[in-house]
Image (spheres, rainbow, N blue to C red):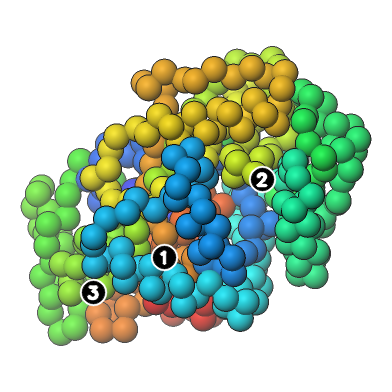
Amino acid sequence: MKKVSIIGGGIIGLTSAYYLAKEGYEVVVFDKSDMNDGCSYGNAGMIVPSHIIPLAQPGMIAQGIKWMFNSQSPFYVKPRLNTTLMKWGMQFYKHANLSHVQKAMPALCDLSLLSKELYQDFARESSSFFYEEKGLLMLYKTDKTGEEIHHEGKLAEELGLKVDFLSKEEVSNLEKGTATNVIGGVHYKSDAHVYPQKFMQFIKEELQKLDVKIYSHTTVTNFVLKNNAVAEIVTDKGSFTTDEVVLAAGSWSPEIAGKLNINISILPGKGYSFTLKDQDHKPSIPSILCEGKVAVTPMNRDIRFGGTMEITHTNDTKINQNRVQGIVNSINDFYPELKIEMPEEKDIWYGFRPCTPSGMPIIARDKKLKNLTLVTGHAMMGLSLAPATGKIVSEIISEKPTSVKTEMFQF
């Protein structure tokens, strides 16, 4: 039985472990954390076939430059003299065009729809992670944003997604949980959501049943190579032989890949969220507050608010209160009845989303090391795309045809 070692115990690593174990492989997972935090836990829990346009898109550079001068803006690049940042920025600039977006959209849509099907399979096994299909409401307050959101909705319709274009009145008829201060909305009916912590708990329990070994608090320090392949993974807890390696370490993937002389262009996009528990009065439908780029997700009795994309580095562990204040301001602007207060620092979660300059995830065999598969760069869509990614990883390693085309996910 072939042994597959997965580096990274976030949702991408764990779903890869699940589908590989189902294929009959002996699977081990290594993660340097206790695996109870990280991007897979504090995200908005949205499963979003609607998100067909990558971060690298026309107009994003100009918008980003404007936002850089506002400490509460939704997107921010921490200015610093750094060759990695400069190279990433140049690549982002090259990808921010219509041709790239047109190629990316069907690839992202197919991957997302596969993921949603696989989430439905999981939900048939367990209701513990509160999978719901209420769609996603894109709410807007200005005509300019409305035009952009309508245009994106039409593109999604062309790809076969179900979309409703709503007036102000239709939004308030649909969103019964609380009043909305908007001029309209677009309802993506194909979208769904889960409670991320609960899903992570569920998948860990499934891996236990499948005899997957998980080594938390274990840092990968080096590799032993033989015949153009990784023969051993060296960690601070000892060395482990392996037949296959899956690198799924999110924002830390470039650092680990560097030990193999592989250069992956990824920068962490820092995001924040906070969760209010046991709320009777809350929005009932997952929404994006478009002008503020704030995600709002009801999760059973709780509600989670998340937002901002701050391109930074993984040592940036300080909570930027201004950015959280920007999220709070947006919520109160869109939902005037909620009267949300600034959360205490201990209640603010942050995580690093791994962002490629193309805005596309990497799901690919390495070209030099024959037993290495790279799976990273899912940015804010890690949870949404995880099951499909995990399934494709198992297909790549089993040398089977992949469930969706992967040309756009190379690096």
Query: Label 3: few (<14), some or many (≥20) within 10 Å?
Result: some
Q: Is residue 278 above or below residue 175?
A: above
Which callout, 1 or 2, points to the residue nearer the camera?
2
Which sits in the foreground, 346 or 216? 346
Q: Position of residue 202 (x, y in %)?
A: 49, 38
Instruction: Tell me the quarter of the picture where residue 204 sits.
Output: top left
Residue located at (82% from left, 43% from top): 184
Decide which of tag 3 and tag 2 comes sooner along the chain.
3
Residue located at (80% from left, 70% from top): 158
Query: Label 1: few (<14), some or many (≥20) within 10 Å?
Result: many
Residue located at (50% from left, 75% from top): 95
**Residue position marked by numbered label 3 in the rendering:** 262
**Position of 21 compared to 58: left or right?**
left
**Residue position marked by numbered label 2 in the rendering:** 290
**Residue position marked by numbered label 1 in the rendering:** 356
- Identify which amino acid the numbered label 3 is placed on: Ile
**Position of 333 compared to 217: left or right?**
right
